[in-house]
Image: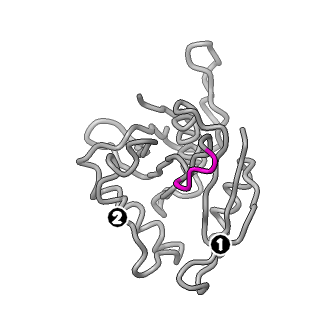
Amino acid sequence: MDYPVTSYSRRALPQSSSLNPPCPRPSGVSDALHCRPVRPADAERVRAVYERAMRNADALLPGADHSDLDAPTEAYADGAFLVGEVGTGAGTEVVAVGGVRPVEDGDDAAAFELKRVAVLPAHQGQGYGRAMVRALEAAARDRGAERFVLETGEDQRAAQGLYESLGYECVERVSYAGGEVVGLGYAREP
């Protein structure tokens, strides 16, 4: 199932219809982001988008386990991993990625964790991160999610702002690598 997210520029807002209601999107967004399930052939591009975005945010941790990006279709088989594309035909470009899957510890069967949400630096600030999160939440709700959780770096202010603007609340501090790296845990109940 595809999870299209349509965006409109400020100058050309279409008339709302029951078949194509406009999505609430930031003004000035240039291209629509179309979110679709990842395909095995996307794995290399998924890793490139994720790593470039994390490097740009100074959040790519040396030695961190990103093995789920080697085969995202398998790693997220009980959830969803989506790629966000802009453009059409031969000009289509993957600019955003993200995954969602049930929380691993099993304490809360209805909780799903958002993972690896990233947007290429040249496309940040255009609403694509917001669109990806909303598409991931929709995919998780299709699988029974009643609560969403995620972790982000303590220094990733833009990501924190995005999640907080979407109704996520910071619920905990998380330590990695023996306490050297600190992250923040967020949660939201729709």
User: What main secondary structure does the magenta stretch of the protein show?
Assistant: loop
* N-terminal label among 2 and 1: 2
| SS type, badge 2 | helix
Q: Which of 79 and 29 is in front in this view?
A: 79
**Residue at the image point whose x is 67% and y is 68% from the top:** 184
For residue 106, above or below residue 57: above
Specify the quadrant that holds the C terminus: top right
Q: Nearer the viewer, residue 153 or 105?
A: 105
Magenta extent? 104-108
Residue lying farthest to the front in this orientation: 107
Q: In which quarter of the image is residue 21?
A: top right
**Left of 14 or right of it: where is 76?**
left
What residue type is disc 2 on?
Ser
Q: From the viewer's perspective, tell me whether residue 172 is left or right of residue 74.
A: right
Residue identifier under label 1: 174
Q: Does the magenta stretch include residue 105?
A: yes
Camera-side residue of 152 and 33: 152
Image location (x, y in percent) of residue 7: 56, 36
The answer to which quarter of the image holds residue 182 is bottom right
Q: What element carries label 1?
A: strand
Residue hosting label 2: 67
